[in-house]
Image (cartoon, helix red, strand yellow):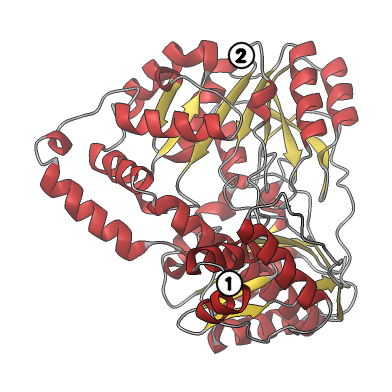
Amino acid sequence: MNCIYSQTPKLYCNPMNLRYENLAEHLLNAIAQNLYRPGERLPSVRQLSQQHQVSTATAVSALRLLEDQGHLEARQRSGYYVRPRPRCSLQEPAISAPSREPSLVTGQELVLRLVKAANDPRIVQLGAAVPAASFLPTQKMAQLLANVARRYSQRIANYEFPPGVPELRRQIARRMSEQGCPVDPNDILITNGCQEAMTLALKAVTRPGDIVAVESPTFYGLLQIIESLSLRAIEIPTHPRDGIALDALQLACEQWQIKGCIVVPNYSNPLGYCMSDTRKRALVELATRYRIALIEDDIYGELGFGVQRPSIAKSWDSEGRVLYCSSFSKSLCPGLRVGWLVAGPYLEQTEYLKYVGNLATPTHAQLTVVEMLAKGGYERHLRQARNQYRQSVEKMTAAIGAYFPTGIRVTQPEGGFVIWVELPETVDATTLAQRALMQGISIAPGQMFSATQKYRNFIRLNCAVDWDERVNQALVKLGQMVSEQ
């Protein structure tokens, strides 16, 4: 892949900044002037402390700030290195152009096959959006699970009926408030992951036969929910950089009686875009104007590549139109299945639906997440995970540029760990996925991400894999198969 390095603009120290910010700006100037080149190691914390007459804590804070901003990468027991800042020459896919009419969801039979492949260690897992264990704090979670079992042996033996463990709801409410979206802990319902949160939200606001607006392409798990509830989906054009097309959504609201709209404003799956604050606010205003329920899936919101966590669309909700869904499955531990729903006026109804569906989310899992949040372990993990995900996306994109034929288009996500790849029009992604699986490679064909089986020549790839020669060879084979079709 042809990439060029963008030069960092020169910054000047501001006497009003904190000392670590001034040191960070000094180091950034040095990088911009090529005193430290891509791949080179910076002075150690001790050396920086002595050279600039600051404490070691200040030096560490400066280095971590530059790491968060993507200028440095930390290598275990080695120090901090200057990260290359490639600007990829591969183009992004164009805005989608789905059907303008509602339809029943079809063609989701492939999903179960994909999920089963994710559990087979013989398969190179590029299909399911599940991070490899190395991206997760597995040892810490094992320790916390054991600690919780000892400390709360009586409590974990019982149901924690809806709305869920109070301590967990308080921790979640605190985090959401810090992100600019004040929520009362009593308004939070703990669920079995984000999938159940979305299911409960849709059950609360729709009836069989109703129309639901979705991004196109959209997460296939959502399409399965819509199919199971006998709803109809209307696909809305979605740009890989800006998100759902608001003018197209407004037109759909004028033409059809839409009951709900489901969006992933932050690092959507599969496109990876992050909507601007202006567009998020306009989206909430549109939902309010047309009196439709807006279901916000924010499961990837913590996994941005930038230093600042993006805003929540519900922050602009003044009438209870937004039902907020999220989970710790992508950011912490998929197996715990701990998510939550802020349903506003639908809280009592969703609590009841949760209770009749499966009684409760496991108490042990909820209390383990509480321990992770309360003791600061979650933030420490996120700092490392964001950099890992960013590096994995860059590495996968570079491999596609190197091994796939010319003319490929690839999204440039701002967070998360999946990419959406547009292949030549001659390629049938379903056929490609079947051939790849026979070679021990799992990929997700584009048809799964559309209610009407569009995106015949698209695939989604999971980048959060343990990169080794096995993965590298899988991509080489995949590129060869694409060239042969």
The label on residue 320 is: 2
Question: Along the line of sight, which residue is nearer the eye, 388 or 246?
Answer: 388
Q: Residue at x 24, y 37 (%)?
A: 363
Relative image position of residue 21 (x, y in whole percent): 66, 58
Residue 207 in view (yes/no): no
Quarter of the image holding residue 259?
top right
Q: Does the image show residue 407?
A: yes
Q: Residues within 10 Å of mark 1 (few under 14, many from 20)?
A: few
| In the depicted structure, whether residue 333 falls above or below residue 313 | below
What residue is pinned by disc 1? 53
What is the secondary structure assignment of the residue under circle 1? loop
Along the viewing direction, whichever of 448 and 240 lies nearer the viewer: 240
Q: Residue at x 64, y 75 (%)?
A: 435
Amino acid type of the residue that numbered disc 2 sits on in the rendered structure: Gly
Q: State the residue lying farthest toward the left.
A: 154
- Left or right relative to 182: residue 308: right
Q: Quadrant of the N terminus?
A: bottom right
| Location of residue 83 in the rendering, given as x and y in whole percent from the top left corner | 69, 76
Would you say 97 lies left or right of 353 here? right
Which residue type does callout 1 highlight? Answer: Gln
x, y (%) of residue 375? 34, 47
> Residue 420 shows which numbered tag?
none
Q: Position of residue 366 (x, y in %)?
A: 31, 39
Q: Residues within 10 Å of mark 2 (few under 14, many from 20)?
A: some
Q: Identify the element where label 2 is drawn.
A: loop
User: The C terminus appears in which quarter of the rendering?
Assistant: bottom right
In the drawing, does residue 197 fall left or right of residue 25?
left
Q: CA distance from mark 1 to mark 2?
A: 53 Å
Choose the circle earlier in sequence order: 1 or 2.
1
Which residue appears at 28% of the width and 26% of the height? 359
Q: Measured along the vertical axis of the image, is residue 419 above or below residue 165? A: below
